């Protein structure tokens, strides 16, 4: 049975004599791991797997970016609040130092002048 199969394959695929002269050796098929699955379906399925993995990675990266942006916004908000608080404290401290130096009426006039200047600069 095996000899007849060999003869049939040789008759279907005519090849010349072996270069080595070892005619008694059997001809071997090329080694393929997934020999029966060499159809286009298998190729497409592996391509689909890669596409799915790419899509999953993109989704993961987008979610990670969103989370990083949220944390950055929170940090920026905290920093902004600290800066505003420091500015208020510095203003209070400056006002208390001026009140020690200046007369109360003169201090009120100075504050009004500063408010006018601030309003003019904001326009």
Image (cartoon, grey):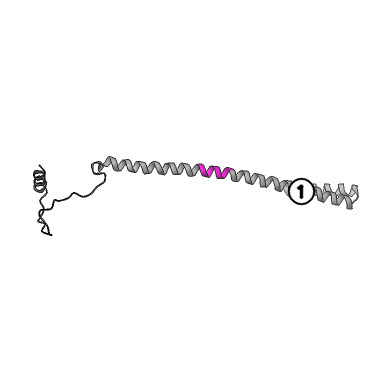
The magenta-colored residue range is 63-70
Can you say which quadrant of the picture contains the N terminus? top left
Q: Residues within 10 Å of mark 1 (few under 14, many from 20)?
A: few
Horizontal relation, residue 13 to residue 69: left or right: left
Q: Is residue 65 magenta?
A: yes
Residue drawn at (40%, 43%) of the image: 53
Horizontal relation, residue 42 to residue 3: left or right: right
Mainly helix, strand or loop, the magenta region?
helix
The residue where tag 1 is placed is 118
Residue drawn at (32%, 40%) of the image: 45
Q: Is residue 82 visible?
A: yes
Residue drawn at (74%, 48%) of the image: 86
Q: Is residue 100 above or below residue 56?
A: below
Question: Which of these two is toward me, 26 or 117?
Answer: 26
Residue 118 position within the rendered picture, expressed as x and y whole percent measured from the top left: 76, 48
Q: Is residue 123 visible?
A: no
Residue 41 position within the rendered picture, expressed as x and y whole percent measured from the top left: 28, 40
Dot 1 lies on which element? Answer: helix
Residue 4 position within the rendered picture, expressed as x and y whole percent measured from the top left: 8, 44
Horizontal relation, residue 65 to residue 106: left or right: left
Q: Is residue 35 magenta?
A: no
């Amino acid at each position: 049975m095996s000899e007849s199969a060999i003869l049939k394959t040789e008759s279907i695929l005519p090849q010349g004599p072996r270069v080595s002269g070892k005619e008694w050796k059997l001809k071997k098929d090329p080694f393929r791991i997934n020999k029966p699955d060499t159809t286009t379906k298998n190729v497409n399925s592996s391509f689909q797997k890669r596409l799915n993995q790419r899509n999953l990675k993109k989704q993961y990266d987008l979610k990670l970016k969103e989370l990083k942006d949220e944390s950055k916004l929170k940090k920026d908000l905290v920093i902004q609040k600290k800066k505003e608080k420091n500015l208020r404290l510095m203003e209070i401290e400056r006002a208390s130092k001026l009140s020690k130096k200046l007369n109360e009426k003169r201090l009120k006039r100075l504050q009004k002048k500063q408010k006018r200047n601030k309003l003019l600069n904001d326009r």
